[in-house]
Amino acid sequence: MSSIIITLTLLGHFAPLSPPTTKVAVKKPAAVKKAATQTKKTGVKTKNATVQTKQPTQVKKAAVHTKKAAVHAKKAAVHTKKAAVHAKKKKITAKVTTPAPATIALKRQKPASRVIRGTVKTSKASTPIHLAHVPATPKAVTLKTADKRKVRSVKTRRPKTVAYPPIGIYQIHLQEFASIRVYDENGYLRPQALAEFNQINRCLKTGVVLEMDYRVLVELYEAWIAFGMPSVTLFSGCRQAPNASENSRHNFGTAIDYNFDGVTRRELVSWLLSRRDRKSHGVGLGYYPNSYHIHMDVREAHAFWVDLGPAGEKGSRMVADSYHWFATERKQRRRAGEASSKEPEPQATAVNTPAEEPETSAAR
């Protein structure tokens, strides 16, 4: 009984205290219903408006994506074209540079008994092993192919010819050398050439510089050109007293003593004699067969003399008929040699050479 009482009390304890409520349906008025329907409709409209406003932005984004895709496609097409062009160039260069390789086939060899480190182990091959690719041997060049080849012709440069080359004069006593350009490019006499010629012809003893006659330089230059431009040795130009007489043309700057190396004095004198009739002025020539130079001056009338005095001796031994003696010089020398052999030989005496420069043409 006690158990039953306990169960009943428990059930009574958990039972709901409040009675169940019943729902009563209350009718809403018509105005409230209309307001609710209107609010629903406005909500739907606002949703449609938001959807409609969202649609244009999405369309724009889609258009941008399509444009980007088109640009990427174009770039990919350009890259493919470039790759194709590079591949073609590589093929062309390979065809041009590398000739058709000729492979050498060798028989299979026995594998080595021991293995060396660093080498690649090869398995037994049934087919021949190609060891290397050797380029094909070039064809022999024939005459026809050689003619077709472009060979550049070597241009030979012609040396520049100078119309009026400078004359080189060496003063043997002053030990000075002068290279004088007598004429300019247009063929006019240069004033600087005359100044240089005056300086190289100054007096050895006194150092006086005279104005030399320009015709002396012109005569010297013409003879120098005619004999192939040899080296000129100048012995004396200007000479002042007491080294020259008062009437000597060396004292006035119109005479020089010189010779050409490699040209005999007779050849030089004969050429000057043959040319002096073409001049408008007179030329004086002195021939010294026993000396080292000739004498040339400029004067009003022509003159020619032969002096047989030896080199270094003062005074002169003039020949009576200089033209006849010059024409028959060999005969005259033979006669002089025969006459000297008949005379008794003088006793040997000491010869004193003069310290001063010899004067062999003092009166000329």
Image: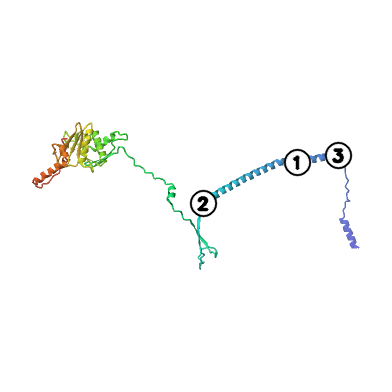
Dot 3 falls on a residue whose secondary structure is helix
Colouring convention used in this rendered image of the protein: rainbow
Name the foreground residue: 284 vs 120.
284
Q: Which residue is drawn at 83% across and 39% down?
A: 34
Quadrant location of the N terminus in the rendered image:
bottom right
Q: Is residue 138 above or below residue 60?
A: below
Q: Residue at x 50, y 56 (%)?
A: 101
Mark 1 is surrounded, within 10 Å at the Cα level, by few (under 14), some (14 to 19) or many (20 or more) other residues, namely few
Q: Which mark, residue 48?
A: 1
44 with respect to 115 (left or right): right
Residue holding disc 2? 95
Q: Nearer the viewer, mark 3 or mark 2?
A: 2
316 with respect to 124 (left or right): left
Q: Distance between the residues labelled 3 and 2?
A: 97 Å
Q: Is residue 117 above or below residue 216?
A: below
Q: Reading the chain from its start, which is encountered first: label 2 or label 1? A: 1
Dot 2 falls on a residue whose secondary structure is helix
Quadrant location of the C terminus in the rendered image:
top left
Name the foreground residue: 169 vs 36.
169
Name the foreground residue: 282 vs 28.
282
Q: Position of residue 271 (x, y in %)?
A: 22, 38
Badges 3 and 2: C-beta atoms under 8 Å apart?
A: no
Mark 2 is surrounded, within 10 Å at the Cα level, by few (under 14), some (14 to 19) or many (20 or more) other residues, namely few
Q: Reading the chain from its start, which is encountered first: label 3 or label 1? A: 3
Q: Nearer the viewer, mark 3 or mark 1?
A: 1
Q: Can residue 144 be spotted in the picture? A: yes
Q: Which amino acid, mark 3?
A: Ala
Q: Residue at x 60, y 46 (%)?
A: 77
Mark 3 is surrounded, within 10 Å at the Cα level, by few (under 14), some (14 to 19) or many (20 or more) other residues, namely few
Q: Where is residue 175 in the image (x, y as percent from the top left)?
A: 23, 42
299 with respect to 140 (left or right): left
